[in-house]
Image (cartoon, rainbow, N blue to C red):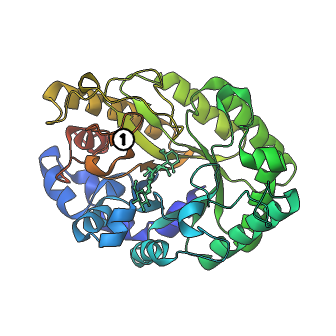
Amino acid sequence: MLMSRRRFCHQSLVALSITPVLKKSALAQALRSTGLKDLYKDDFLIGTAVSNRTLQEEDRAMLDLIAREFNAVTAENCMKWGQIHPEAERWEWELPDRLVRFATGRNMYILGHTLVWHSQTARDLFRAASGTGVITRDDLLRKMEDHIRTLVGRYKGRIAAWDVVNEAVDEDKGWRRSRWFEILGPEFLEKAFHWAHEVDPKAQLLYNDYNMHNPGKAKFVAEFVRDFKKRGVPIHGVGMQGHVGLDYPDIREFEASVLLFAEAGVTVHITELDVDVLPQRGASGTAEISTRVEYSTELNPWSDGLPTEMQDRLARRYEELFRLFLKHRNLIDRVTTWGTSDDESWKNNFPVPGRTNHPLLFDRKKQPKPAYRAVAALKTPS
Ligand code: G3I
């Protein structure tokens, strides 16, 4: 498990050998040139998701911040099927290539997100070649194989890990009835893992999902992971997305799932961490992207900034989460936040469009928040 860290973190290992002797008062100064990645260098990788906007505009301030604070990056959107491979013969390599160039140049661990997902697919993916009706099983398998071979092959040796399959489980109801499942049955997962492994045998291959604290969902995932391992399907890790709130889920449920996945024989990656601070209605806790709740001003109370007591609550929640991650640092390979600064978070538009959310470690001016300082302080001797 630690191999990936050793391989990708030597820059940061050199950079912060001084941290053990830092006094708290020196923290701010040290963090100006180094970042969370250095404080956590012996524990796990610290990652973020990079938005299309950052890559399109080559936003220097954001890229510098990412390079200082993080040693792992995930493509937030630009490697999803619908964006990178919108038509059978059309591939959009520009943004993914920029991300891979940026991260490779800085010796960062790169996550490919994601090979097979029911959402954000290409428009014609499930359509028969004739243009009418549903694609046949064989044709869909062929498309999937071609997609995986081309994409994993292009970045072989540079992308360290892939979210091979994303969100294939429907809470505690078992397999999600997606188009993939309806046409191919559960076999689509193992095919995807086998093909990705064939192309890049050194890449870490992950199954990634949300609400993984849900005991029914976690049990179902742990069971298929165990079964995969028994039958030689190359799966190496489970991604617990971690789209959580200030008071959900109970941290003990989250911990139970970390232990369950580790017992099933894989490493755990926290892949999409953010903490929703806004009032919930109905769809609380889900990350299913099709969920929508109508906007109202009561649901958007902090559009002018997060008050101090809420900043404190957010900081305590991040602290609680990172304490848990540290407790299980031997089981957890990476902790990635889903974005860097609050302005770019998908949580501003989900599940209620047009709100001002504050779920990340950096504010809208890219300044570290109290939550950031709470996470940093856990690794700073008092
Ligand atoms: O690219 C188009 C652009 O051409 C168009 O002008 C614009 C207008 O809305 O939309 C752009 O696409 C948007 C895309 O993000 C890129 O910015 C989509 O509308 C929007 O729905 C999409 O949202 C992303 C969502 O996944 C769906 O793919 C979020 O940014 C992204 O944070 C979110 O991430 C997912 C993970 O992949 C899987 N786990 C859950 C997580 C949150 O939903």
Quadrant where the C terminus is found in the figure? top left
Q: Quadrant of residue 12?
A: bottom left
Q: Position of residue 18 (x, y in %)?
A: 26, 60
Q: Which residue is mark 1?
A: 349
* 272 left or right of 202 in image: left
> Under 8 Å from ligand 1: the CB of mark 1?
yes
Q: Viewer-proximal residue, 48 or 352?
A: 352
Identify the residue at horizontal 47%, vertical 21% (top origin).
250
* 102 left or right of 253 in image: left
* 356 left or right of 308 in image: right
Q: Quadrant of residue 132?
A: bottom right
Q: Viewer-proximal residue, 9 or 382?
A: 9
| Any part of residue 110 in sight | yes
**From what the image shows, is residue 284 above or below residue 136?**
above
| Any part of residue 17 in sight | no
Q: Viewer-proximal residue, 43 or 344?
A: 344
Q: Amino acid at mark 1?
A: Asn
Q: Viewer-proximal residue, 248 or 150?
A: 150
Q: Position of residue 265 (x, y in %)?
A: 72, 44
Identify the residue at horizontal 52%, vertical 69% (top origin).
7
Quadrant where the N terminus is found in the figure? bottom right
Q: Position of residue 47 (x, y in %)?
A: 42, 55
Q: Residues within 10 Å of mark 1 (few under 14, many from 20)?
A: some
Q: Secondary structure at mark 1?
A: loop
**From what the image shows, is residue 212 above or below residue 123?**
above
Q: Quadrant of residue 80?
A: bottom right
Identify the residue at horizontal 39%, vertical 63% (top origin).
52
Identify the residue at horizontal 70%, vertical 67% (top origin).
148
Task: Give the tally of numbered discs.
Answer: 1
